[in-house]
Amino acid sequence: MDYFFDWPEDALINVANRFLIDVELPNEEIRDAIALNMSCTHLSIAEANKEFLEMERRHNYTTPTSFLELINFYKSLLGKKIGGITDQIERLEFGLGIMQQTTEKVDGLSKLLEIKMKDVEIEKEKTDKLIEVVTKESGLAEKEAEAAAI
């Protein structure tokens, strides 16, 4: 005696919608599409069970409990995936923050480098002038040393 009867598609959709009500989704259209997909999946398994009975002469049943297990599995898997994506978003935002800080530091160091390069140019000019003075004075000192040696 077969105690299991197939549920109609509308009943499956309503049950899926009821159990998915606590799942946060962007809009109701997505919830309806998920419920429709679950009902189609459950009904396709019922069709596969009929084919299995014809081929193997063995019964395989899909029960209301198996449909509820499908819904719970979906909710569990969705929660894990959302959690993983949330973790990735947080890591990405943290990395972007670090990159922003680094960019700001590099910009600051670039400005400081420009200032230092200007200071280096000024010191280089002073050094060139000092070298000229020292060269002139050493030339004069050599002439005086030659004059004193005579």
Image (cartoon, rainbow, N blue to C red):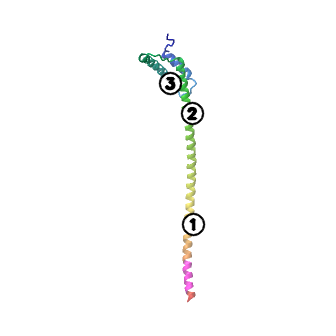
**For the residue carrying disc 2, how many other residues have a C-alpha within 10 Å: few (<14), some (14-19), or many (20+)?**
few
Q: Quadrant of residue 146?
A: bottom right
* Secondary element type, mark 2: helix
Dots 1, 3 in contact, CB < 8 A: no
* Secondary element type, mark 1: helix
Compared with 89, 5 (above or below) is above
Residue at 54%, 22% (x, y): give it: 69
- Mark 3 sits on what residue? 34
Residue 143 on the magenta segment: yes
The tag earlier along the polypeptide, 1 or 2, is 2
In the foreground, 7 or 107 = 7
Q: What is the spatial separation of the Cα atoms under label 1 and label 2, in whole angstroms?
A: 59 Å
The tag earlier along the polypeptide, 1 or 3, is 3
Residue at 55%, 62% (x, y): give it: 118
Q: Residue 7's x, y, as percent?
A: 50, 15
The tag earlier along the polypeptide, 2 or 3, is 3
- Amino acid type, label 2: Gly
- The quadrant of the rendering that contains the C terminus is bottom right
* Secondary element type, mark 3: helix
- Amino acid type, label 1: Glu
**For the residue carrying disc 3, how many other residues have a C-alpha within 10 Å: few (<14), some (14-19), or many (20+)?**
some
Q: What is the spatial separation of the Cα atoms under label 2 and label 3, in whole angstroms?
A: 19 Å
Per the rendered image, the range of residues in magenta is 136-146
- Mark 2 sits on what residue? 83
In the foreground, 50 or 95 = 50
Tell me which secondary structure the magenta stretch mostly adopts: helix
Residue at 58%, 51% (x, y): give it: 105
- Mark 1 sits on what residue? 123
- Amino acid type, label 3: Ile
